[in-house]
């Protein structure tokens, strides 16, 4: 197996503790295929100091914003050239199907291109202040050294959404990828270096969250933390960051309502509902895990879901015929199975799946059959807590007002779907739902030009679009006196 060292200050660095490595496991085969460095506090300190130095000295702070944009565009080009290899790495690391990862890799360069274009369009202002003989201005400056903590389900997408705007703003970055899926991020460093990114501007320290993540969040030279992951880990990071008033952006959990009204195109809604929960084996923060269906069509709609879900082909993520791969990690696999048992114990009716799956005689893979529960009430744990797996809870409703009430009755507010042919209802329900992204007659549609992020306990800040770069900038006010003659002495009696 190949060893993948860390990337610090433009060089490949082994762990400071010596010969300490973590195996990265193929979730389909259940066997290790690579080793990543098990970093620690010493490695974090080295990386953060390199990023801090690059922020204030050297080529990066002296570089024009336009030149920074050129480098970001070159990074996007490099990802496009290496898309097939990067897609294969991520499919092997996290078990997502290769066709989906190829599609994702084809879209990731667009995030880099978008922020490349923003780099030299960061502008201040000239406020007309109520002070005579004073020129007032505001300037936008990089927030500083950014700690980017990414999740295992879409590593390079999260790198793009965090690092592209941070670098466009002039920040420097230390990435801590998930220990379950770090290899693609390390491969990405080769692309960034080849694109001309100066040493120290982007660094990667791999390892466990307790060893690397905590040290990174608490490092005194880190100015901002951007985290994607579970709400429980997010709360811990938020508390740690607060000790030194670090800025934070957090994209956390979701329990998104996908609402189907009786006047919807039910065929399209059924496809959207199935793709919205069983795509990527449900391992999406925006998964439409609560399916709210108007009672007048609920029985017929449920039959459509069963037919579509039963035709899903699970198997080797690298095979073109596969629709859904395995659960990415052993802890997540067990968590999903636990929630299936919780749903059954709560009295929900499991009408499909509800058990591990053996695929083509392959017993090692962490497969769980697409699972649908009916007779779910919104106070059940399977309706309130994020499962992050292929578990769908169907909840009935009668009126538009009831759908909105149920949709909002959860601690999360990341995304929601609305399926209806009534234009007025499309607007009313979209405005009434408390979620950062609302999809109408579609689901899981993303664009680098649009911000995403959560309300309530789904997070803080936004990633993507114009709003995405704002979180990596600070506003500084400057006031210049234009008065002639000496400044009046306020301590002398006039």
Image: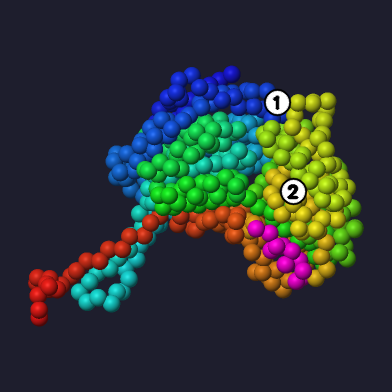
Residue at figure coordinates x 59%, y 24% from the top left: 23
Q: Is residue 24 left or right of residue 65?
A: right
Q: Is residue 401 left or right of residue 92?
A: right
Residue 178 in view: yes
Residues tagged 2 and 1 counted as in contact (Cβ below 8 A): no
Q: Position of residue 279 (x, y in %)?
A: 73, 44
Q: Nearer the viewer, residue 92 or 328?
A: 328
Nearer to us in this view, 377 or 471 = 377
Residue at 78%, 37% in the rendered image: 368
**Mark 2: secondary structure:** helix
Q: CA distance from mark 2 to mark 1?
A: 24 Å
Q: Quadrant of the N terminus?
A: top right
- Mark 2 — residue? 277
Residue designated by label 1: 30
Name the main secondary structure of what is drawn in magenta: helix
The answer to whether 330 is drawn above or below residue 459 in the figure is above
Residue 15 position within the rendered picture, expressed as x and y whole percent measured from the top left: 45, 25
Give the color scheme: rainbow, by chain, secondary structure or one colour.
Answer: rainbow
Taking the image as shown, residue 70 lies to the left or right of residue 424, namely left
Q: Is residue 464 visible?
A: no
Q: Which residues are magenta?
A: 400-411
What residue is drawn where x is 72% and y is 43%?
Answer: 389
* Residue drawn at 79 percent across, 43 percent down: 340
Q: Which mark is residue 59?
A: none
Along the polypeptide, which appears first: circle 2 or circle 1? 1
- Asked if residue 401 is positioned above or below residue 477 in the image, the reply reads below
Q: Quadrant of the C terminus?
A: bottom left
Q: Quadrant of residue 220?
A: top left
Crowdedness near tag 2: few (<14), some (14–19) or many (≥20) residues, C-alpha within 10 Å: many
Between residues 338 and 187, which one lies in front from this camera angle?
338
């Amino acid at each position: 197996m190949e060893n993948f060292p860390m990337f610090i200050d433009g060089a490949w660095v082994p762990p400071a503790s010596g010969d300490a490595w973590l195996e990265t496991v193929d979730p389909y085969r259940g066997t290790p295929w690579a080793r990543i460095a098990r970093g620690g506090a010493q490695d974090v300190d080295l990386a953060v100091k390199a990023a801090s130095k690059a922020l204030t000295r050297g080529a990066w702070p002296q570089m024009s914003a336009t030149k920074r944009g050129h480098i970001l565009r070159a990074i996007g080009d490099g990802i496009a050239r290496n898309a097939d290899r990067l897609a294969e790495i991520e499919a092997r690391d996290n078990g997502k199907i290769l066709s989906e990862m190829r599609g994702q890799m084809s879209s990731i360069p667009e995030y880099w291109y978008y922020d490349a274009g923003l780099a030299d369009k960061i502008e201040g202002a000239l406020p007309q202040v109520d002070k005579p003989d004073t020129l007032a201005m505001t300037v936008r400056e990089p927030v500083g050294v950014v700690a980017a903590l990414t999740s295992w389900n879409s590593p390079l997408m999260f790198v793009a959404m965090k690092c592209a705007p941070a670098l466009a703003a002039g920040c420097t970055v230390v990435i801590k990828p998930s220990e379950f899926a770090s290899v693609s991020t390390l491969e990405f460093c080769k692309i960034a270096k080849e694109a001309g990114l100066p040493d120290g501007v982007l660094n990667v320290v791999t390892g466990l969250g307790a060893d690397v993540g905590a040290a990174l969040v608490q490092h005194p030279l880190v100015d901002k933390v951007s985290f994607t992951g579970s709400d429980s880990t997010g709360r811990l990071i938020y508390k740690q960051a607060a000790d030194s008033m670090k800025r934070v952006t957090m994209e956390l959990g979701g329990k998104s309502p996908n609402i189907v009204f009786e006047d919807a195109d039910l065929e399209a809604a059924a496809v959207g509902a199935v793709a919205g929960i069983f795509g990527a084996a449900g391992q999406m923060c925006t998964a439409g895990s609560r399916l709210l269906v108007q009672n007048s069509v609920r029985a017929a709609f449920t039959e459509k879901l069963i037919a579509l879900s039963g035709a899903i082909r699970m198997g080797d993520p690298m095979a073109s015929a596969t629709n859904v791969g395995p659960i990415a990690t052993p802890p997540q696999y067990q968590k999903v199975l636990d929630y299936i048992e919780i749903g059954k114990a709560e009295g929900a009716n499991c009408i499909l799946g509800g058990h591990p799956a053996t695929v083509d005689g392959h017993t090692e893979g962490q497969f769980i059959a697409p699972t649908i529960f009916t007779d779910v009430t919104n106070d059940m744990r399977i309706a309130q807590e994020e499962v992050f797996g292929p578990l769908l809870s169907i909840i009935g409703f009668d009126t538009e007002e009831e759908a909105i009430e149920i949709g909002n009755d959860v601690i999360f507010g990341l995304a929601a779907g609305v399926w209806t042919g009534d234009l007025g209802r499309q607007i009313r329900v979209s405005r009434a739902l408390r979620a950062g992204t609302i999809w109408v007659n579609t689901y899981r549609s993303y664009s680098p030009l649009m911000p995403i992020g959560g309300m309530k306990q789904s997070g803080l800040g936004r990633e993507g679009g114009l709003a995405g770069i704002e979180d990596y900038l600070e506003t500084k006010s400057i006031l210049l006196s234009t008065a002639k003659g000496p400044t009046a002495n306020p301590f002398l009696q006039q």
